[in-house]
Image (spheres, rainbow, N blue to C red):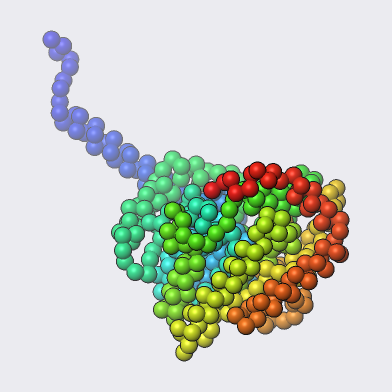
Amino acid sequence: MDQHRIDDPRAYARYGVWAAVASLLLMLVAGAINLIVDPYGIHRIVSIDGFNALKPVADRNVSLLKAYQVRTVEPDAILLGNSRVEMGFDADLFSDHFGQTIYNSAIPGATIYEQWRYLENAVALGSVDHVVVAIDFLAFNTERPRVNPTFVDGRLQQSTPDELSRLAIRETAQDIIDVYFSLYGLQASLETVLRQDDPRASTRTPLGFNPVVESPYFWDRLGYGVIFEDKTWSMLQRLHRRDFSFAPTDVWPEGSLTYLERILALCRREGIRLELFTHPYHAWMLESFHMAGLWPAFEDWKRAVVALVAADDVLNGSLPAVPVWDFATYNPITEEAVPEIGDLETVPVYHWEQSHYKASVGTEIVRRMYGLGDVPAGFGQQITLETLEDVLAAQVAAREAYRAARADEMARLQVMADRLDPDDAGTRP
């Protein structure tokens, strides 16, 4: 028998207590570090240039950031949409101009379902009295998944209690652990601090804007011509390979237009001012719709939106009508010239590429919608049941004029169209 061995249960208990205390202290230290660094920019209790003012990690999970940051901000108004809105509307600038807090709640790649849920999340705060929604043709496609990989329904608040609301406690607790008390959270904080001087680092402002800078588009000395062609070819392949529908599918059992109806109904019920607008896609994007055979569906989508809003206006006749602004047309801004391949000097004023526009365009949209000054002729118009068919007809002539004036650009697009494999059409769900 080993006389030196002592089986003391109290020693084991003390060891367990100290281990638990040490673990708790480590978690508290990690939580304090992550709260101060705040890699996602949810709270911004501390914001110091060169230490944590930039939030490069936020780009990896904007869905999480926007779910919680809006609760910190408690805005008067919100902008809804996808990355076009997130990159195109400087909420900080507009908040200063209008004298109220405007939050850019747009999520990259967001479907109309996701936009409706983020609207519910914001409205549940009780502070929102104005909503502007950028409706995107591609966000209504029921032949694509209804949500993106980082979307979590349970972390979002709701206007009415149901099963999703009961999930909120679990999902929110998991987010708190992941962001503040995990190794992943510490890694995110460390990366945030180390990348403060990285000129390529992305960020999000306290009001949700993605302030893209020019320089990343030029470091590789490619020029905007290459960027336009690469992005257009990538988009054209996706459009060519995926069918398009607004109708119910297995993953969209109610179709997609029903979520625009819910946006309208929620805003009416809560007395919230609502405005809708379509994106000013670059003309190369509009041409991509033609080349992919989607132009008829694009026109039918506009008809469906206008009809839905008109029906809502009839049901709520005592309330102001919901305006629908159409910027998705051939016009002086969307027809901006695309630089030639090899041109490393020309910097477009309005567009990053065929799909995303710059904040200068967001400013022009706001000026047009709220009558804040002159904008380029033909840029933006309200569409109704009475005017839409004339607008659509006018676009036929506008397109012909654009194509005739840009023969060189049309030749570049035709090269891409000729590369499409007809056997690939509609092959990707």
* Residue at 45 percent of width and 83 percent of height: 315
**In this rendering, would 41 be left or right of 160?**
right
Residue lying farthest to the front in this orientation: 423
Query: Does residue 286 appear in the picture of this structure?
Result: yes
Find residue 275 and report its horizontal and vertical position in percent.
56, 76
396, above or below 423, in the image: below
* Residue at 71 percent of width and 52 percent of height: 232
Rendered image quadrant of residue 152? bottom left
Find residue 191 and report its horizontal and vertical position in percent.
55, 44
416, above or below 295, in the image: above
Query: Does residue 97 appear in the picture of this structure?
Result: no
Residue lying farthest to the top in this orientation: 1
* Residue at 32 percent of width and 38 percent of height: 22
Find residue 289 and report its horizontal and vertical position in percent.
68, 59
**In this rendering, would 270 be left or right of 48?**
left
Q: Which residue occupies the foreground of this view, 107 or 230?
A: 230
